[in-house]
Each structure stands twice: as C-alpha cells, then as structure tokens.
Image (cartoon, grey):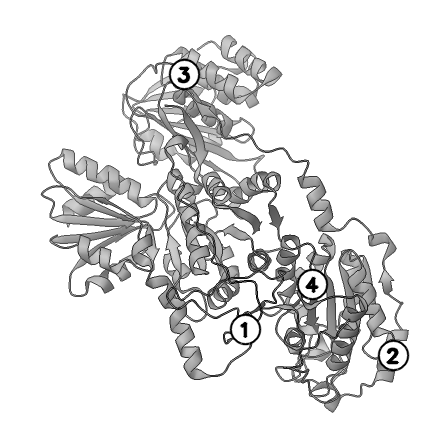
Amino acid sequence: MASLINRNRPPAYCPGCSHETVTKALDKAFQALGLEGNQVVLVSDIGCSGLFDTFFNTHAFHGLHGRALTYATGIKPAQPHLTVVVTMGDGGLGIGGAHVASACRRNVDLTLLILNNFNYGMTGGQCSFTTPPDAVVGSGFLNRLERPMDAAELVRAAGAPFVSRCSSYRKDLPDKIEEAIGFNGFSVMDIWGICTGRYSKRNKLTPSTIQESLCALPPLDGPVQCNLREEYGTHYRRVAALEKKPSPPRAIEPVFEAPGAAREEIVLLGSAGQRILTAGEILCMAGMTAGLRASQKNEYNITVLRGPSVSELILSPEDIVFTGIEKPTVMVALAGEGVARRKALLSSLDESALVLRLAGVDIPPTDAGVHTVDLKSQGVRPPDFALASLAVLAKLERVVNLPMLKAAVSGRFRGPVAEEALSIIDKVNP
Amino acid sequence: MAMTFMEGNEAIGLGALAAGCRFFAGYPITPATTVFSSMVRLLPPAGGICLQCEDEIASAGACLGASMAGLKVMTATSGPGISLYSEHISFAIGSEIPIVIVDVQRLGPSTGSATRGADGDVQFLRWGSSGGIPVIVLAPVDVRDCYELTVHAFNLAEEFRCPVFVASNKEIGMTRESVDMDSWITPPLVERKTAPEQEPYLPFRSHAETGVPPFLPIGGKVLVRQTSSTHGEDGFITIDPALIEADRRRLGDKVTKGLSRFTFFEDLPAEGADTLLITYGVTARAAMAAVRNLQSCGRPVSLMVLKTLWPVPEALIRKKTEGYARIVVVEMNLGQYVREIRRVLGERTVEFFGKMNGDLISPATIEEVIKNG
C-alpha cells in the first residue's frame, strides 16, 4: 500500500524530535495493514502530539487539550468500520486522566498512542504527569515535589486489554503499532521519546538511557490476559439488540365523574419509605380517569431511604396553567418529617380545607377541618400509609372516589401488586 | 380526551427520538437525569447509541465526535454541567458541529440547589463560550413545548451546523402533568445539507446564500478534516486576518439572518391594555394565570411569552411593545433577560421583577407587581 503521509504538509517537528520517528512508524503500520486514508481517522488534541493529524492523508479530528479520547468514543460507534487512532502526549494524559481511565474500562476499539516525552514541549517545557523529580524543567522546583506516574501501569490497572510500554527507537515499532491497531479493543502504547526543543536541552536523555529505564520496569508489551474481554461496540450492539422497544406512554381515558368540580391542591406530607411519590402519581392518574387535569411535583432528600417526602398535586377540571401550590384544599400528614417542611402552609389553611392526619402525627394549629385516622390499628403497614390515605379520601368522597382510585391502581400496577393495593383500599376504614 | 401523565424531561427524550436523534451521551445530574433515563430506554431499541460518560466534558466531546461522524446528537445537564461543557460549546460553535444541548436549569450559583428551579443560566448559555459568537436558545413553558421545541432544536442545529440549547427548568423538567399527546405537532424534520461525495472536499467552504458549509461525515469515502483551531476552508490552520474576520462574522450571521423563521413566541394581547408583560419559561405560566385574574378584576394586561431567547428577537420585541405605556419583564433570576429588552427598547422604561430563591414566582406576586407599578 501507498504511504498515507501528506506530501503537501510533510512532518515538520523540531530536529531530532522522536515524534517524527513515531509518525513514520505509524505510516508503515498503516501500509502493512493495507489501509486507505478514508478507512482511518486520526484523532488528536493540543500539544506537539496534536500535529499528527495534519501530517496524514486520513480523516482527521483535532480538538481541545486532553479530550481526543472523548471524540474518538463518539466517532467509533457511529462509524464502526473506521480505524480510529488517537494521539496524545503526557500533557493530554494528565489533563484527560479521567478519559484515559474510562477508555480503558470501556474497551472501545481505539488505539491510543501516548507520545511520552516527560514535559509540556509546546508551552515551554513545564513538568507533566511523567516528569522525573530530578529533571530540570520550566516549572521551577515544583516537579521535585510531585511523583511521576507510570502511564502503562495506570492503563493496565484501569482495564486496558492491550498495553505496550516502549521506546520510540525500538526497531520493530511499526510492527508493534500494527499489532496495537489490529487488536480488537482498546490498545494503548506508552511510547517514550525525546523532546529536543525543550527537555533534552537541560536533561540527559538518549535512546540508550530510555532503554535502560524501560528495562528496569516490569515488561508490558501486548495483550494483558486478565483484561481481555469483548469489545465495547460489539458488546453494546449485542445487548442493545435484545432490549425491548419501550411501550408508548399510557393514555388514560376519562370514564368516571369526579366528586367535586373545583380545582383541588393536595399536599402529601410523609417520610421516606411511605411511598408518598407513588401515591401522588396514583392520585393524579385517578383524577385523570375522571377527565381532570393533573400535575405532580415532588420533594425528597438525596438520602432516598431517610428524611421527608413531599408530593404536591393539582387536580382541576380546567387547564392547570400555574403548577405551584398556593392554597391547598387537602393536606395529608403522615409523618413529622414531611409536616416540618410545610408548617407555615398548614397553619395558613382556612376552614374550607381538610387535613387528613395519621394518628400520632403532630400538626401545628390550623383552622382547617382535621380528620384523624389510625391506620396502624387497622393493620396497614407504613409502606402502605400513603395509599391507604388515598382510600380514606375516596371513602370520604373528597377529591376522588373509589372507582377512580381503583382504576388508577389497576392501571399503574399489575398482578399481585395490584391485588394487594386493591385489598388495602377495600379494607381501610375512614 | 385520553391524557398521558408525563414530565418535561421525558417529553424531551421523545422529541429527540422523533427528530432523528441517534446518539446521546450524558452524565447524571439532578434535575436533568431523567432526560438520560429516557434516552437509555428509547435509543438502544431504535438502533441508537446512549453513553453514560465519565463527566460532562466527555459527554459533550463524544457527542461532537458522533455528530461529525454523521449522527444527530444530544446531551443534557444542568448549570454545573454547562460549566464543564463550555470548551466543547466553543468548539461546536467555531467548528460548526450540530448538537442539541438541554439545560434543565437549577438554582445557582455553582452546585447551588439540585432540586430547586431557576432561570439563572440564560445569559450564561449565550456568553458561556470563548469568542462570543451568537448561539440559539429555545425556552419551553410546558411539557408540550419540551417535545416540540426539542424537535425544532434538532432542526436548527442541523440547518445551521451549530449548538442549539433547550433552556428548561427543574419546574418543567421534573413536574409531571397530564398531557394530550395527540395534539402535539412534530415539525417537519430538517437534515443537514450534504456536499457531493467528491474530492477535493473543502469542509469549511460555506454555501454562498446560507453561509453554512455542506457536510460530509468523518468515516465516509471523502476525507474530512475537523479542527477546533482557527481554520480556512480546507480545515487547516490559517493566520490570514481578513479570512478569519470574515469567517467569524459568518458564524454569527448564518444564525441571526434566519431568526425570523425560528422566532417562537406566544402572544396574548388584551383589549384596552396599557401594560405588556414579557416573560419566558415556567414563569410564563404564573403570568398567564395572573393576566387571567387581572382580567376578571377588570384590569386587562397583555402578555408576550418568548420561546426563542437567543438570538434576541429584536424586531418582534420592538413591534409587540408598540403602544404600551408600561413594559414589565418578570423572570426567575435577578435580572438577566431584561437587559436585552432594555437594550432593544433603548430610551423606554422597562420595569422588572425577579426572584431567585428556589420558589416559583406566583400569579399573586405578578398581580401585585402590575397593580403597584
């Protein structure tokens, strides 16, 4: 195959830069794989590694510092046949650290070439994630305080199934790149090299010292047995094909008549575990079985198993328009945690409002009519308190009636869950 | 009439699917998480791809990659995520990558309040990118808008090759409502204009009339170059000031010159009204209730609800405010969009009421503002 090097814009690095060696090796790998330019995309970002995409006659995507892997992660699943090669430096490795780790975990079929030259060449030779502490760099003494990171070891630990840590000057670099590209999964090469423009001016670094340093480390040069697994895209398509098409949102026909004709604003005040939000949903659906408009807003703690749970509901024969609760017609007090969140609102109620109070729950003084119900003594468990309180409202013919409530429950649940809920509604004594 | 019980975020998912979205990448964040939940349910069975990324930067980045590979893409977040999207918003603007970005706004600044609504990002969405090039921002009022404006957002992103924001609010996104889905209208879909599949392809040579470069996907037969750097028509870096200047102007012009076609708004004039109330987003609902109450007390007030916030529909604002003695702007922040109304209306006095404490602005509050002005 022909070279994919862009003859109109031949590689132009600093003299002696090892990036040029890698560029030529990558081209040889493309040729050995028999790839045409339009079968390849080079994805790069900022730094000297970001020059790669301009030197090849391939598709190219060049973006922001450290983010090349994120673009590649979007390109590959959209064009699965495409060979995607990502270049980044040790700068990109640092600023895009989370992307590197995630790409390893994900295992999309990409090849990442880390052009590791131990400093930020483009901005003046500052220290990077891989700079040795005894190096002289453009960051003053700061690199002495931080420990360099072993990129290959990191990606191995993060789950990359192909890892090679090697020198830009290894004789078989084209073969190794070819192997990495041919590998079906996320392959990473941590390729050590020399930045002649910045780093090696002040630090002794030669092909042979690189080789010595590499020899002192445990070898990593190909597939990592314990990380081998199905490639992400193949896996995704296999699992996605089994996903059922979601059923369209359920429409509720108006078949009943609501007990009242006015706008009702209902607030359920409870605690986590009482299924307040589900009860709110059921009340709205019950209203909809009578052709009422419904809205629901919820409030709960991030600790979903502890703390207050509040549901604000509006049922109205007219369009709801404003979804805020201004003047509740019914407040249901099932737990102190919820009551504490709406104390002022409870106190502001007038005599036309109803407070449905669970026996034992304290509420502030109010002008509203208070109806107390003891659900515990009726054998209702706390997870069913909210549902049972709806049954009480239905039996009082307030907001909803029994046919509306039962229709909502039968629509929302199936099988034994529905039967259990219906039996609770039947047995509750208002 | 059969009704469905649904929240705004789910409607955004349905709108995206109807618009042809086949790639979503996101990172969970309240109150936008349920957009992601919808997409992970809807996309895979439709042959689409839904990714949960490591952060918002990666989510936006993956979307840009997939968009350039030819798919219609969307991501969704809230204020803290918009902050992280910033560099990729700039990229999408400068390098003309279609993407729909949903911002289900929550009370800021910063992490603020995850479960409290606000419209505190409306200037941030406009200006939160490097370069200051105009963007498109649509603001839904209710669940139906969430569906329809999302489809419009895709159409605009594809037509103009730019990011388009849907500026929702926790109070719309996470509020469930009964809706008549049968009455929803799916706007006709717009696909990005493609270039002939022949070399040489200049990826940033814009169409003479539209100012938008015809598209070819990365991965197709013809080589495509995409870059975030300042580029010429060929996608390689340029330093030619004349060329750069012309191109920067084109990026804004291509969007603003089409504005009249996507100036979405609702106009509720009242006979004999001397006051025009202007608002947007969830506050429009309180305003509608307030205007209705005022009317029944014999105080007619006109209302205009803006659904295209950016580019600012200046011609519309000038025209609709004619003849009113009072202009009142109400919004769920401490005064952001009112700056635009004042800028457009120049010498005229524009009254303002804003609130930013996590609570909705109530109809009663708006009525007081009108009465006490």
Q: For the residue marked with disc 4, what is the amino acid?
A: Gln
Tag on residue B103? none
Q: In the picture, residue B164 is in which quadrant?
A: bottom left
Circle 4: is it few (<14), some (14-19), or many (20+) Cα within 10 Å? many
Q: Which residue is mark 3?
A: A393
Q: Position of residue A423 (x, y in %)?
A: 55, 11
State the image quarter where residue B283 is shown: top left
**Proximity of marks 2 and 1: CB atoms separated by less than 8 Å:** no
In the structure shown, which secondary structural element does the residue marked by tag 4 occupy?
helix
Kind of residue indicated by mark 3: Leu
Tell me the residue that label 1 is attached to: B235
Q: Residue at x 38, y 49 (%)?
A: B118
Question: Pointer 2 and pointer 4: residues touching (CB < 8 Å)?
Answer: no
Q: Nearer the viewer, mark 1 or mark 4?
A: 4
- Chain letter of mark 1 equals B
Choose between A347 and B13: the one closer to the eye: B13
Disc 1 and disc 4 on one polypeptide chain: no
Chain ID for label 2?
A: A
Residue A205 coordinates in the image, percent (x, y): 80, 85
Residue that mark 2 sits on: A211
- Distance, label 3 to label 4, CA atoms, is 67 Å
Residue assigned mark 4: A39
For label 3, the SS is helix
